[in-house]
Amino acid sequence: MRENPLKEVWREGRTVVNGWCGIPSSWSAELLARAGYDSVTVDLQHGLVHYDTAVPMVQAISTTAAVPMARVPWNEPGIIMKMLDAGCFGIICPMVNTREECERFVGACRYASSGGYRSWGPVRASITGGPAYFDHADDIVLTFAMIETAQAIGNLEDIVSTPGLNAVYVGPSDLSLSIDGRPLADYKDRPDLRDVLRRVVDTCDQRGVVTGIHCSSVDHAQRMAAMGFDFVTLLSDGAYLAAATTADVTAMRSGTSSTSAAKGPY
């Protein structure tokens, strides 16, 4: 049975560095997975990815040491179970605002033997996980409930006390949109919003729940790790592609040097 290495990272007191795939391509997923991330998440919510494309992306990630995960489009059991059956070792579920919604999400990730209602049919998971998949699935599959509204913050204690919940994952843009009326990815200049993040970290620490957050730069991720977040997502594949190509084209046309670290044209 393949273990979930992320739990070992947390036991050692280290921060998981997570990659993010929004481009519907197994090739780009493989490139990210070979960059050294602890885990790589396929984004079926805001990424341009559907199930038929997500499966080969998960397969590509699984050829590396990175842990394959998925963010599902919504708190809907069908797609949650299908991504687990496809071999994901963790699910990030958006817009979890109440204890009831969290229970519904966690239940879709757990078999009846652990109090859930996940249907048995691990078509690919039983191949990657091995013949003992059933015996260990409820221990290795990580459940991340997204905290991204003022309502979720108000219900935070109830949400994180949900049995079987491993982690919360802050979506800072939606959270600030809910609280302040505008999407803001980085709260560097907003001490009031940073206080909300500290409340999330403190509350989860008290319950033994892992904290994750979506970040907009390496500097942002480093500051969040220093704040106490256990799981940080760097830029998506699309954001990296856009930033690198823009920088190189601009450097070429301006006659300045490029910061590109590519070792060749391919």
Image (cartoon, rainbow, N blue to C red):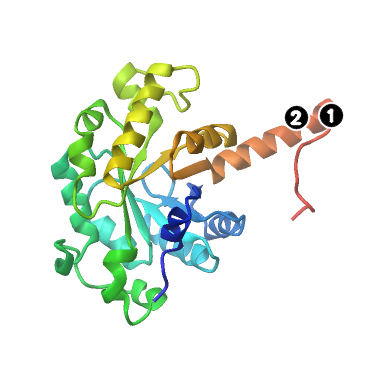
- In the orientation shown, which residue stands out farthest toward the right? 255
Q: Residue at x 14, y 62 (%)?
A: 115
Circle 2 Cα neighbour tier, 10 Å, few/some/many (<14 / 14–19 / ≥20): some
Circle 1 Cα neighbour tier, 10 Å, few/some/many (<14 / 14–19 / ≥20): few
- Position of residue 8 relative to residue 132, above or below, is above
Quadrant of res 142: bottom left
Using the image as rendered, state which of residue 36 and residue 8 is in the foreground: 8
Disc sitting over residue 1 in the figure: none
Q: Mark 2–mark 1 contact, CB under 8 Å? A: yes
- Position of residue 99 relative to residue 56, above or below, is above
Element type at mark 1? loop
Q: Residue at x 41, y 69 (%)?
A: 3
- Position of residue 109 relative to residue 13, above or below, is below
- Position of residue 16 relative to residue 63, above or below, is above
Percent coordinates x, y for residue 202 in the rendering: 33, 35
Q: Is residue 27 left or right of residue 181?
A: right
Q: Is residue 250 left or right of residue 161?
A: right
Q: Residue at x 38, y 62 (%)?
A: 88
Task: Indicate the amino acid at tag 1.
Answer: Thr
* On-image quarter of the N terminus: bottom left
Percent coordinates x, y for residue 28 in the rendering: 57, 54
Q: Is residue 209 left or right of residue 104?
A: right
Q: Residue at x 29, y 36 (%)?
A: 203
Task: Indicate the amino acid at tag 2.
Answer: Thr
Percent coordinates x, y for residue 196 in the rendering: 34, 25
Give the residue pinned by disc 2.
Answer: 250
* On-image quarter of the C terminus: bottom right
- Sequence-wise, which precedes: disc 2 or disc 1? 2
Element type at mark 2? helix
Q: CA distance from mark 2 to mark 1?
A: 8 Å
Give the residue pinned by disc 1.
Answer: 256
